[in-house]
Image (cartoon, rainbow, N blue to C red):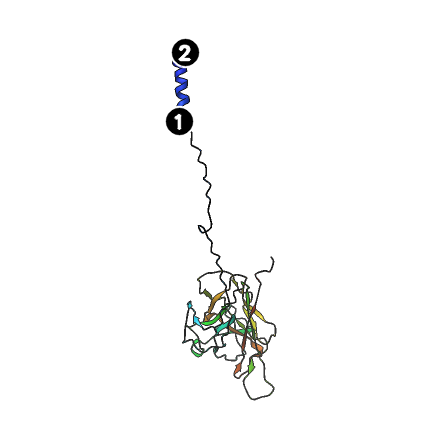
């Protein structure tokens, strides 16, 4: 019996030794000159030196040659590329009994006038603004707009101004040439005509505004509001002044 146990133990020990994993030692590779080499790779990124061109508002990766009357001359690096040049609002009839749309027919202090799309020069039936950013810095940008006073268009040197007039703009639809979204905010929607303070209409935060960005605003959502007490007969006009400038830096807060 003792012999069988000893033989069994020796056999089991032999099996365990056979099944132990083998230790693989890494071979030391020695090389001599002429057997290995390396390649250093570099690349430089520079801003595009060409002037920008308007793009299709629905497909910002496609340039076009048939954009409607442009309110800006495009530049390079950071540039306004397109701005709708001409809009006209519906005619307003003066009435001392102008009423609101409320059920009690209460008097209104101001009246909102719709934009007239047939008398405006729109693109794809939209008010369009396009921004191009080819700086390659990652910095953001600010798009601001101010409005001149709404002034009576006549030959009187003492121009009559419609005080308190304002234009309301919607958020609109934003599209990018790289189809990314986000990073664009709209702090302001109201342009007080005659107010010297600039309204920041659109802001691109850092690392989000590169390439081409288009904004399309539905004309049915663009309103001209005027105080009823200041409505006097005549043809009035104003100019919206758009400015694009460097905004938040990609190093701000870091």
Give the mark nearer the N terminus: 2 vs 1. 2
- Residue under the image location 56 percent in, 81 percent down: 151
The one nearer the camera, 97 or 138, is 138
According to the picture, the residue beneath numbered tag 1 turns out to be 18
Question: In the structure shown, which secondary structural element does the residue marked by tag 1 occupy?
Answer: helix
- Residue under the image location 41 percent in, 11 percent down: 2
Question: In the structure shown, which secondary structural element does the residue marked by tag 2 occupy?
Answer: helix
Q: Where is residue 111 in the image (x, y as percent from the top left)?
A: 53, 74
Q: Where is residue 150 in the image (x, y as percent from the top left)?
A: 56, 79
- Residue under the image location 39 percent in, 24 percent down: 15
Label 2 environment density (alpha carbons within 10 Å; few <14, some 14–19, many ≥20): few
Tell me the tag on residue 2.
Answer: 2
The one nearer the camera, 81 or 32, is 32
Can residue 172 be spotted in the picture?
no
Q: Position of residue 154 (x, y in %)?
A: 55, 87
Quadrant of image for the C terminus: bottom right
Are the residues flagged by discs 2 and 1 in contact, CB closer than 8 Å?
no
Q: Position of residue 114 (x, y in %)?
A: 48, 74
Can residue 18 be spotted in the picture?
yes
Is 163 placed left or right of 173 in the picture? right
* Rendered image quadrant of residue 11: top left
In this rendering, is residue 111 above or below 157? above
Quadrant of image for the N terminus: top left
Residue that sits furthest to the front in the current view: 33
């Amino acid at each position: 019996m003792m012999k069988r146990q000893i033989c069994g133990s020796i056999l089991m020990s032999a099996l365990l030794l056979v099944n132990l994993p083998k230790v693989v030692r890494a071979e030391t590779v020695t090389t001599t000159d002429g057997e290995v080499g390396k390649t250093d790779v570099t690349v430089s990124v520079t801003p595009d030196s060409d002037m920008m061109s308007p793009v299709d508002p629905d497909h910002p990766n496609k340039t076009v040659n048939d954009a409607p009357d442009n309110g800006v001359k495009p530049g390079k690096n950071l540039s306004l590329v397109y701005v709708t040049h001409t809009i006209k609002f519906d005619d307003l009839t003066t009435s001392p009994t102008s009423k609101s749309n409320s059920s009690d027919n209460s008097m209104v202090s101001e009246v909102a006038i719709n934009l007239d799309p047939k008398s405006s020069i729109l693109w794809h039936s939209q008010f369009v603004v396009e921004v191009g950013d080819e700086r390659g810095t990652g910095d953001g940008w600010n798009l601001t707009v101010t409005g001149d006073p709404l002034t009576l268009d006549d030959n009187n040197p003492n121009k009559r101004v419609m005080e308190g007039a304002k234009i309301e703009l919607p958020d609109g639809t934003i599209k990018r040439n790289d189809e990314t979204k986000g990073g664009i905010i709209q702090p302001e929607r109201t342009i007080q005509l005659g107010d010297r303070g600039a309204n920041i209409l659109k802001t691109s935060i850092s690392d989000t505004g590169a390439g081409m960005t288009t904004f399309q605003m539905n004309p049915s959502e663009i309103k001209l509001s005027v105080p009823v007490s200041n409505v006097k007969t005549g043809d009035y006009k104003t100019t919206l002044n758009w400015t694009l400038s460097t905004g938040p830096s990609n190093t701000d807060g870091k």
